[in-house]
Amino acid sequence: MAFDFRKRSDSKTNRQSVLQLLKAELQFVESGGYRRSERSPWRPPYVFEESPSCPNYSDRSRPHFCVDCWLMQFVAPDMREEQVPCRFVQLTPEGVTIDSLYRYGSTAETEDLLRDWLQQRIREIEAQLGENSDLPLAANS
């Protein structure tokens, strides 16, 4: 699923912030961050929810609303009302989401698809920033 930032009304600074968050998430994946949960070592960590890029990462009381999360721009509009919307980030054109990987995918498959998705989003934003930094952002909604 290509994500075109050029139609969104946010600033270049937002694109750069999202780019840095995507890169941090990729670094977390590549460093094995999703291989073992510190909070619950008997199960793999929840993707995005147990990442330093989650606004609620270090606070179990979840004081931040998902609607305010930077990942919401990657969640299909019809899935934004879900209890944990980031589980519905579509990782492939075929519709594979974090949620579907929890049901049918292995930890290795999840990590591979997430890595690919992150790398693609990073390339897209870097290309857009390189094309014309004055273009407004676009959402897929």
Image (cartoon, grey):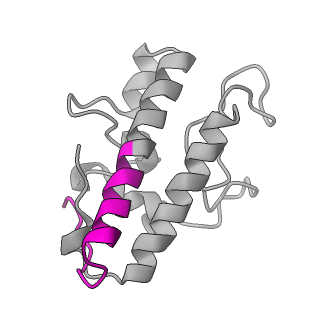
Q: Would residue 72 be visible to someone looking at this image?
A: yes
Residue at point 27% right, 85% down?
A: 134
Queried whether the magenta region covers residue 121, the answer comes back as yes
Residue 44 lies left or right of residue 47; in this view the side is right
Residue at point 32% right, 70% down?
A: 130
Image quarter of the N terminus? top left
Numbered range of the magenta stretch = 120-141
Indicate the quadrant where residue 46 lies: top right
Indicate the quadrant where residue 87 lies: top left
Is residue 120 or residue 87 the one in the foreground?
120
Residue at point 69% right, 31% down?
A: 32
Is residue 49 or residue 14 the one in the foreground?
14
Image quarter of the C terminus? bottom left
* Residue at the limit of the structure toward the front, as seen here: 130
Q: Is residue 118 above or below residue 15?
A: above
Q: Would residue 69 be visible to someone looking at this image?
A: no
Residue at point 42% right, 23% down?
A: 101
Q: Is residue 80 above or below residue 109?
A: below
Is residue 114 or residue 97 the one in the foreground?
114
Queried whether the magenta region covers residue 17, the answer comes back as no
Indicate the quadrant where residue 64 lies: bottom right
Residue 111 lies left or right of residue 52; in this view the side is left
**Image x and y of residue 103, in percent:** 43, 19
**Image x and y of residue 41, in percent:** 79, 25
Q: How many marks?
A: 0
**Image x and y of residue 86, in percent:** 44, 47
